[in-house]
Image (tube, rainbow, N blue to C red):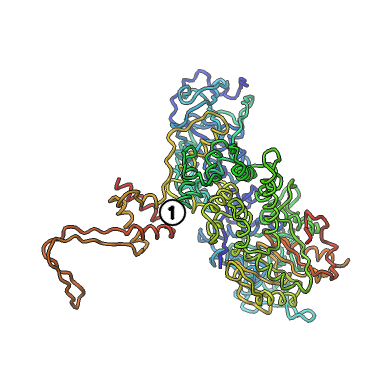
Amino acid sequence: MSEKSDLFAQDSPSVKPSPVKSWQMVTNQSNLFYMIAAGMIMPPDGFGGKYYLDTVSAFPGYLPIFPNNVSESAINFSISEKSHLLPCILNLELSELSGPVKIITQEGDVKDLTFPEDVDGSCQLMLVPAPLPMNFVNSIVYRSREDKIRCEKDAADFNNVDLSSFSIKTTAGAFNKLKSQNWPLKDITVDPVRTVLDVPMAAGAMMGLLLNMNNCDDLSILAGRLAFDPDISLPELASHPVIAAMGVWFQKGVVDTGDVSQKLFWDIVGKVAASKYSIEQTNAIDVAVDYLETMPSDQFDDKTRSYGERLAADLRAILGLADNTISEIFERHPKPVSRAMTLFVLREKIEDLLEFSNPQLTEADYILAAILFAAREGWIGLSKDLREFPGLGLAVSHRIAQMSHRLSGTQIYFSNPPSKPETLFRLLSSDSGPLSKSQNDAALYVARKMKWDCIETRIKLGKGDYQLEVTSSGIQLKLDGDINAVVTGVMQGKFKDYLCNSVIPAKLDRKVREILKVAK
Amino acid sequence: MAKRRFRLPGIQDLSKEQEDARALPMEGQHLIVGGPGTGKSILALLRARRLAQEDTQYVFLVYNHLLNESSRQLLDGKLVSNTWNKWFMDFYEDIIKESIPKLPPKGRSKWQEIDWQTVLEKLSAIDPEQRKLTLIVDEGQDMPPEFYQSLVNLGFENFFVMADQNQNLKDGLNSTRQDIANSLAIKDERNDSEVIELKYNYRNKYSVARLAREFYTGDPASPPPDLPSMSIKSVKVPLCYGYADQDFKGLIRRILKTADLNPSKLFGILTYNNEDRKKYCNALIECNVKLDNPKPVINTFSSSERNAISFDQGGILVINAQACKGLEFDTIFIADINHFICNDRNRDNTKRLFYVMVARAIDRVILLKQRGMHCPVDSILPVDESILERK
C-alpha cells in the first residue's frame, strides 16, 4: 500500500516541519459550487457526472488536504479540464474533526495516523476520508478580484449556490506562497474507501423539508425533531410507525425492524435515493413503481405484495389518460403510503408539493410524500428559498457528513453538532403561561410588521374615577392619579393562527431571531 | 390558476456540455447546436438574464409570435424579446428609412417573404459600425442565411445562437449549421470546431425522447440526443389511444380530468388543421365535468385568431401542428393522427413534423386516433409497445 515516491524530490527531506497554520484544499469554482449546493466536500462520486478533475480524484474516497499551502501544480491540475475553470483554495477549520487519517510524509511514505493528536505540519499531505461538512470551510480564496466577480455572477445562475455564508478572500498571498510539489502524484497508491452519499443526501433534504413544513402541526413537528435527532425516543409517534422508522433509516440506511409496512415504504425511499447515484440512468418514479411490482417474495407476504401490485397498476393508470380526479383517487386509496406515492408520481418538484392541498390529505400522508420527494431531490435539490431557514444549512451539513461516515464505517467523528434550527412558531410559543419579555417583543415586532390584527394593550390603573371626553381633536381618557403600567402584547391564540397560516419573509425571520438573541 | 414560471436551474441540473455553453464569454459569436430537450432555450434565457443584470443591451429573437410570448412570460415579462422578422424589419426601416422590400406572394397565400437580395444590396451602402447590442437567437436555424449576413455586414459582433437543423419545417428558407457558422465566422471543421454540441436530452423524459427518436430523419449536423438504455419499464410510456366517434365527449372529459390532476401544467393539443383545432377547442370549452380545481383555461391560437395566450399558468392550448415549433408543454396530445398525410413523397416531412411535435413534450405524449378510420401515419409509428403503448 505504501510506496516511496520521487514526488517530493524537489524538497529536501530534512526540512524542519512548520506548525500548521491552516489546512488547505484546492479545487475549481465549478466543483466548489457543486459542493456548496450539496453541503459537503465530497469525492467525485457525489457529483453526478459533473465532476471536473481536481486534486480529489487522486485518492478515491479521500480528501487531500495540504498543510499551510498548496502546490502550484495542484492548482494547475484543478483547472486543467476546461478553459472556463478558475482555481479556488479552501482554508479549512478542522478543530472539530477527529479520527483515523492517512498522511504522506516528506519522503513520500503513506502512514496511518489519528487526527489531530498524531498529525503535525511535517506531513506533505493529509488524506481525510470524505466527506467533510461544508461549514468546515473557513474561507474561500480566489486568485484575483476578477475571478471573485466572475464566480459571484456564475453562482447567481443557480438556485442552490449561496456564497453569502462564506468568507471570500482575494489575497494573492495564498497563490504566491506555493509548494513546488508535482501533481498528480505518481507512484503513491492508497486503497480506495467507499463513501455513502445517497442516504445522507436524502436525509438532508428530509431535514430541510420537514423543518420548512413544521411550523404548527404536531405530527410534522415530531417528524422534524426525529429528522434532526434520529436517536431520540418519541413515543408520541407510536401511532405512525412508518414515520417513526425514519430514525432507524437515518442510522442504518435500511429499516430492518420486522414491520413490513415500515420496510416497504423505506425500501422505496432507499431505492429512490440510490437512483440519483446509479450508474444506469434511472427515473425515480420508474424505480419506485418497479419496486412495488417486484417486491421480493422472501421479504414480503402475499398480502403486501398484492397491495404493491394493485397500487403500481393504479399509478400507471393515473399517468395515462386520466379517468379520475385526485379526490377520487384518494377516496379509493386511504392509506398514507398509497397517497404519498400518488403525489410522488403526480408532482415533480418539492415546490409543487408545498403548493398542493386537498381536504382529504392528512398530515401523515403529506409527511410521507415529503419524505419521498426529499429522497428524489436530495439536499442538493432544495432551492435557496428553502435553505435560507436560519441555521438550517449549518445543521444539515454537519449531520449529513457525519451520517456518511457512520454508514461508511470510517470512524471519523465531528464534534459539536450544531443544534436543530427552531421554527418561529416554537421560538414564539410558551409551553406554560405567558411569553417571556423577549418573546413578547419579538412577537409584537412580527405582528406589527405583518399588520396582523392580534395586538392588545392593557393599562393598569389605580382605583378611582375616569371619564371619556370627546373633543373635536379626538377622544381623551381622563384618569385620576397615575398609571401603574401599560403592557402591549399579542393575543397568543390569534397570533399563533396568523403565524401558522402565513409565510414570514426571510428578512423578518432573521430580525426576529436577532431580537430573541439580543434579549438572551 | 396555478402559476408556471422559469425556475433557475440547480447546479446539478446543467451538464458539463451545457456549462461549456453557459461559460462562453459574454461577447463574441457563439453557436450552440442540439436536438430538442438538450437545454438550448434555458441557456439562452440564462444568457439574457445575465446580460440584463450587467446592463448590457440585448434582444432575444425567436421564430414566431407564440414562442415570443412563451419566452417572455416565463421571465415574468422582463425579457427583451421579439420575433426575428419583426425586429429585423423595424431595424431595416430605422436605418434605411423605407419599408423592407418583399417578394410577391406565392400562390393563394398573402404571405410575402423578405426580398433578401434587395435587402443585402441596400444595406451594402451603409458603412458598418460597431454595434454593441447582443443578439440572442433561439431556433436560429429558422432564420435565413441572409439574416445573419446582413447583421454581420452592419457591424453586429455579439451573437449567441441556438440551433437544431432537425427542426426545420419550411424547406429553403432556413439556415444550416454551416450557414450560420460561416456567416458568424465561427470555426466548424471536423475535429476543430468552436460550435458547442449539446447531445444529451434533459427536457424530455426518457420515454418521450425515445419516441421522438423514432421520427429522427438523420441530419448529422444536429445529431439526435443521446439516450441511455433503461432496464426497467417506464411508467410514462407514450400512449396511442383509440376512441370511437361516439366516445368523443368521453375523450374530452378525460383530457380535462388529466389536466385537472396537475393544474399548474400546460397541456398542448396539436391538430392537423383548423377544422380539428376548432373541434377540440369548442368541445373542451363546452364540456362540463366535475373537477377538483377550477376548469383549466382553454386557449387557442392561429394566424387569423391571435388571442392573448398565457404561458405562465397551467391550462390547455389547442394549436395547429405547424405552430408548435419551439414551444414547450408538459403533456402533448396529438389529436386525430388519422388526418396527417403520410406517403412515399412526404414521409420524411411527416416524420420531421412528428419529431418536432413529440419533442414539445416534457413529460407525456398521447396520440389520439379515431378507431375504424384509415391512419396513414401508422406506417411511421413504432410497433414496439415499450416505445408506444396502444389502448
Instruction: Confirm whether residue A109 shows in the render.
Output: yes
Instruction: Confirm whether residue B24 shows in the render.
Output: no
Is B59 displayed left or right of A510 in the figure?
Answer: right
Mark 1 neighbour class, 10 Å CA radius: few under 14, some 14 to 19, many 20 or more: some
Q: Which chain does tag 1 point to?
A: A
What's under tag 1, amino acid-wise? Cys
The answer to whether B177 is drawn above or below residue A431 in the figure is: below
Q: Which residue is at the front of the view, A337 or A24?
A: A337
Q: Which residue is at the front of the view, A385 or A354?
A: A354
Determine the residue positioned at 20% across, 73% down: A475
Quadrant position of residue B375: bottom right
Is B384 displayed left or right of A398 in the figure?
Answer: right
Which residue is disc 1 drawn over? A216
Quadrant position of residue B169: bottom right
Furthest-right residue in this view: B344
Rendered location of residue B377, percent (x, y): 83, 65
Rendered location of residue B297, percent (x, y): 61, 72
Rendered location of residue B241, percent (x, y): 76, 64
Secondary element type, mark 1: loop
